[in-house]
Amino acid sequence: MSGLRERKKAETRRSLQEHALRLFAEKGYDATTVEEIAAAAGVSHMTFFRYFPSKPAVVENDDYDPMLAAAIRSRPPDEAPLTAIRHALVAALRAMPAGELSTVLARSRLIVREPTLRARQSEAQRATRQMFAESLAGRGALSDFERQVVAGAALAALTMAIEEWVRVDGRQELADLVECAMTSLTRE
Protein backbone atom coordinates (compact mmCIF):
# COMPACT_ATOMS: atom_id res chain seq x y z
CA MET A 1 0.00 0.00 0.00
CA SER A 2 2.71 2.49 0.91
CA GLY A 3 4.54 1.63 -2.33
CA LEU A 4 1.49 2.68 -4.33
CA ARG A 5 1.10 5.82 -2.22
CA GLU A 6 4.75 6.75 -2.75
CA ARG A 7 4.43 6.19 -6.51
CA LYS A 8 1.33 8.40 -6.63
CA LYS A 9 3.12 11.14 -4.70
CA ALA A 10 6.11 10.93 -7.04
CA GLU A 11 3.78 11.10 -10.07
CA THR A 12 1.99 14.16 -8.67
CA ARG A 13 5.30 15.86 -7.92
CA ARG A 14 6.62 15.10 -11.41
CA SER A 15 3.34 16.28 -12.99
CA LEU A 16 3.49 19.58 -11.10
CA GLN A 17 7.07 20.16 -12.24
CA GLU A 18 6.33 19.24 -15.87
CA HIS A 19 3.28 21.52 -16.04
CA ALA A 20 5.18 24.32 -14.33
CA LEU A 21 8.04 24.11 -16.81
CA ARG A 22 5.62 24.06 -19.75
CA LEU A 23 3.71 27.08 -18.43
CA PHE A 24 6.91 28.98 -17.64
CA ALA A 25 8.07 28.38 -21.24
CA GLU A 26 4.71 29.47 -22.67
CA LYS A 27 3.85 32.43 -20.44
CA GLY A 28 7.06 33.33 -18.65
CA TYR A 29 8.05 32.61 -15.08
CA ASP A 30 6.67 35.78 -13.49
CA ALA A 31 3.37 35.63 -15.41
CA THR A 32 2.61 32.06 -14.28
CA THR A 33 0.78 31.55 -11.00
CA VAL A 34 0.81 28.61 -8.61
CA GLU A 35 -2.95 28.30 -9.18
CA GLU A 36 -2.37 27.87 -12.95
CA ILE A 37 0.29 25.23 -12.35
CA ALA A 38 -1.97 23.32 -9.97
CA ALA A 39 -4.96 23.52 -12.34
CA ALA A 40 -2.86 22.26 -15.27
CA ALA A 41 -1.74 19.31 -13.13
CA GLY A 42 -5.32 18.62 -12.04
CA VAL A 43 -4.79 19.37 -8.34
CA SER A 44 -5.65 22.20 -5.97
CA HIS A 45 -3.22 24.99 -5.17
CA MET A 46 -3.12 23.63 -1.59
CA THR A 47 -1.90 20.30 -2.99
CA PHE A 48 0.84 22.21 -4.81
CA PHE A 49 2.07 23.53 -1.45
CA ARG A 50 2.17 20.01 0.01
CA TYR A 51 4.85 19.22 -2.57
CA PHE A 52 6.62 22.54 -2.93
CA PRO A 53 6.91 25.36 -0.37
CA SER A 54 6.98 28.06 -3.08
CA LYS A 55 6.84 28.69 -6.82
CA PRO A 56 10.65 28.83 -7.13
CA ALA A 57 10.91 25.44 -5.38
CA VAL A 58 9.06 23.73 -8.25
CA VAL A 59 12.07 24.61 -10.43
CA GLU A 60 14.84 24.21 -7.87
CA ASN A 61 13.94 20.99 -6.07
CA ASP A 62 15.15 17.67 -7.40
CA ASP A 63 16.34 14.31 -6.13
CA TYR A 64 19.80 14.35 -7.67
CA ASP A 65 21.97 15.16 -4.63
CA PRO A 66 21.31 11.85 -2.79
CA MET A 67 21.86 9.90 -6.02
CA LEU A 68 25.12 11.75 -6.73
CA ALA A 69 26.32 11.30 -3.13
CA ALA A 70 25.85 7.54 -3.44
CA ALA A 71 27.64 7.53 -6.81
CA ILE A 72 30.63 9.42 -5.35
CA ARG A 73 30.83 7.13 -2.31
CA SER A 74 30.76 4.07 -4.59
CA ARG A 75 33.91 5.13 -6.45
CA PRO A 76 37.14 3.21 -5.64
CA PRO A 77 38.56 4.45 -2.30
CA ASP A 78 42.04 5.04 -3.74
CA GLU A 79 40.71 7.29 -6.53
CA ALA A 80 41.66 10.97 -6.21
CA PRO A 81 38.78 13.02 -4.76
CA LEU A 82 38.25 15.28 -7.77
CA THR A 83 38.49 12.28 -10.10
CA ALA A 84 35.88 10.43 -8.03
CA ILE A 85 33.44 13.33 -8.31
CA ARG A 86 34.12 13.71 -12.05
CA HIS A 87 33.58 10.01 -12.81
CA ALA A 88 30.44 9.88 -10.64
CA LEU A 89 28.91 12.97 -12.30
CA VAL A 90 29.74 11.89 -15.85
CA ALA A 91 28.45 8.33 -15.29
CA ALA A 92 25.21 9.62 -13.73
CA LEU A 93 24.64 12.03 -16.62
CA ARG A 94 25.35 9.39 -19.27
CA ALA A 95 22.86 7.04 -17.57
CA MET A 96 20.12 9.68 -17.42
CA PRO A 97 17.25 9.11 -19.89
CA ALA A 98 16.91 11.72 -22.66
CA GLY A 99 13.53 12.91 -21.35
CA GLU A 100 14.99 13.56 -17.93
CA LEU A 101 17.90 15.47 -19.47
CA SER A 102 15.38 17.62 -21.37
CA THR A 103 13.71 18.45 -18.06
CA VAL A 104 17.07 19.31 -16.50
CA LEU A 105 17.83 21.57 -19.48
CA ALA A 106 14.47 23.35 -19.14
CA ARG A 107 15.03 23.85 -15.41
CA SER A 108 18.60 25.04 -15.99
CA ARG A 109 17.44 27.53 -18.63
CA LEU A 110 15.00 29.03 -16.16
CA ILE A 111 17.57 29.25 -13.39
CA VAL A 112 20.15 30.88 -15.67
CA ARG A 113 17.70 33.33 -17.25
CA GLU A 114 15.35 34.27 -14.39
CA PRO A 115 16.84 36.76 -11.90
CA THR A 116 14.53 35.55 -9.11
CA LEU A 117 15.74 31.96 -9.47
CA ARG A 118 19.37 32.89 -10.10
CA ALA A 119 19.45 34.88 -6.86
CA ARG A 120 18.28 31.81 -4.92
CA GLN A 121 20.99 29.53 -6.32
CA SER A 122 23.57 30.35 -3.67
CA GLU A 123 21.81 28.32 -0.98
CA ALA A 124 21.20 25.36 -3.29
CA GLN A 125 24.83 25.38 -4.37
CA ARG A 126 26.00 25.54 -0.76
CA ALA A 127 23.98 22.39 -0.04
CA THR A 128 25.40 20.61 -3.10
CA ARG A 129 28.95 21.60 -2.17
CA GLN A 130 28.39 20.25 1.33
CA MET A 131 27.00 17.00 -0.12
CA PHE A 132 30.07 16.63 -2.38
CA ALA A 133 32.38 17.27 0.60
CA GLU A 134 30.58 14.79 2.87
CA SER A 135 30.67 12.17 0.10
CA LEU A 136 34.46 12.47 0.08
CA ALA A 137 34.77 11.67 3.80
CA GLY A 138 37.15 8.78 4.37
CA ARG A 139 38.81 9.27 0.99
CA GLY A 140 42.51 9.88 1.59
CA ALA A 141 43.88 12.14 4.30
CA LEU A 142 41.91 15.24 3.36
CA SER A 143 40.94 17.64 6.11
CA ASP A 144 37.39 18.98 6.16
CA PHE A 145 38.69 22.25 4.68
CA GLU A 146 40.42 20.39 1.83
CA ARG A 147 37.25 18.39 1.10
CA GLN A 148 35.32 21.68 0.96
CA VAL A 149 37.88 23.13 -1.47
CA VAL A 150 37.70 20.08 -3.76
CA ALA A 151 33.90 20.10 -3.55
CA GLY A 152 33.80 23.82 -4.34
CA ALA A 153 36.07 23.39 -7.35
CA ALA A 154 33.95 20.49 -8.63
CA LEU A 155 30.77 22.51 -8.16
CA ALA A 156 32.28 25.49 -10.01
CA ALA A 157 33.17 23.21 -12.93
CA LEU A 158 29.69 21.66 -12.91
CA THR A 159 28.07 25.10 -12.82
CA MET A 160 30.15 26.32 -15.77
CA ALA A 161 29.29 23.16 -17.72
CA ILE A 162 25.57 23.68 -17.09
CA GLU A 163 25.79 27.35 -18.09
CA GLU A 164 27.55 26.38 -21.33
CA TRP A 165 24.95 23.66 -21.95
CA VAL A 166 22.21 26.28 -21.63
CA ARG A 167 24.16 28.72 -23.83
CA VAL A 168 24.40 26.14 -26.65
CA ASP A 169 20.76 25.15 -26.02
CA GLY A 170 21.61 21.52 -25.28
CA ARG A 171 23.39 20.93 -28.59
CA GLN A 172 26.36 19.44 -26.74
CA GLU A 173 26.10 16.56 -24.30
CA LEU A 174 26.08 17.77 -20.70
CA ALA A 175 28.23 14.79 -19.69
CA ASP A 176 30.90 15.85 -22.22
CA LEU A 177 30.83 19.43 -20.96
CA VAL A 178 31.16 18.25 -17.35
CA GLU A 179 34.05 15.98 -18.33
CA CYS A 180 35.80 18.89 -20.08
CA ALA A 181 35.19 21.34 -17.22
CA MET A 182 36.31 18.90 -14.53
CA THR A 183 39.38 17.81 -16.48
CA SER A 184 40.41 21.43 -16.97
CA LEU A 185 40.75 21.76 -13.17
CA THR A 186 43.73 19.39 -13.16
CA ARG A 187 45.36 20.52 -16.40
CA GLU A 188 48.66 22.35 -15.99
Image (cartoon, rainbow, N blue to C red):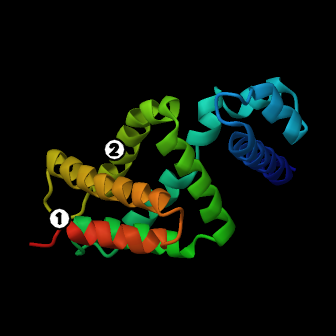
Residue 54 image offset from top left, x and y in percent: 64, 26
Residue 74 visible? The answer is no
Q: Nearer the viewer, residue 79 or 44?
A: 44
Q: Nearer the viewer, residue 50 or 123?
A: 123
**Looking at this rendering, what residue extends furthest in the right direction?**
42
Q: Nearer the viewer, mark 1 or mark 2?
A: 2
The residue at the point 22 percent across, 69 percent down is 184
Residue 60 image offset from top left, x and y in percent: 56, 40
Which residue does the numbered mark 2 point to in the structure image?
130
The residue at the point 53 percent across, 62 percent down is 169
Label 1, residues with CA under 10 Å away: few <14, some 14-19, many ≥20: few
Q: Earlier in the sequence, mark 1 or mark 2?
A: 2
The residue at the point 19 percent across, 50 percent down is 149
Image quarter in which the C terminus is found:
bottom left
User: In the displayed structure, does residue 56 sit left or right of residue 118?
Assistant: right
Question: What is the spatial separation of the Cα atoms under label 1 and label 2, in whole angstroms?
Answer: 18 Å
Please name the amino acid that badge 1 sits on: Gly
Q: Are marks 1 and 2 in contact (CB under 8 Å)?
A: no
Question: SS for tag 1?
Answer: loop
Q: Nearer the viewer, residue 94 or 147?
A: 94
Disc marking residue 140:
1
Label 2, residues with CA under 10 Å away: few <14, some 14-19, many ≥20: some
**Is residue 46 shown above or below 95?**
above
Please name the amino acid that badge 2 sits on: Gln
**Looking at this rendering, what residue extends furthest in the left direction?**
188
Residue 119 image offset from top left, x and y in percent: 43, 30
The image quadrant of residue 58 is top right
Question: SS for tag 2?
Answer: helix
The residue at the point 81 percent across, 44 percent down is 12
Residue 48 image offset from top left, x and y in percent: 77, 31
Residue 11 visible? The answer is yes
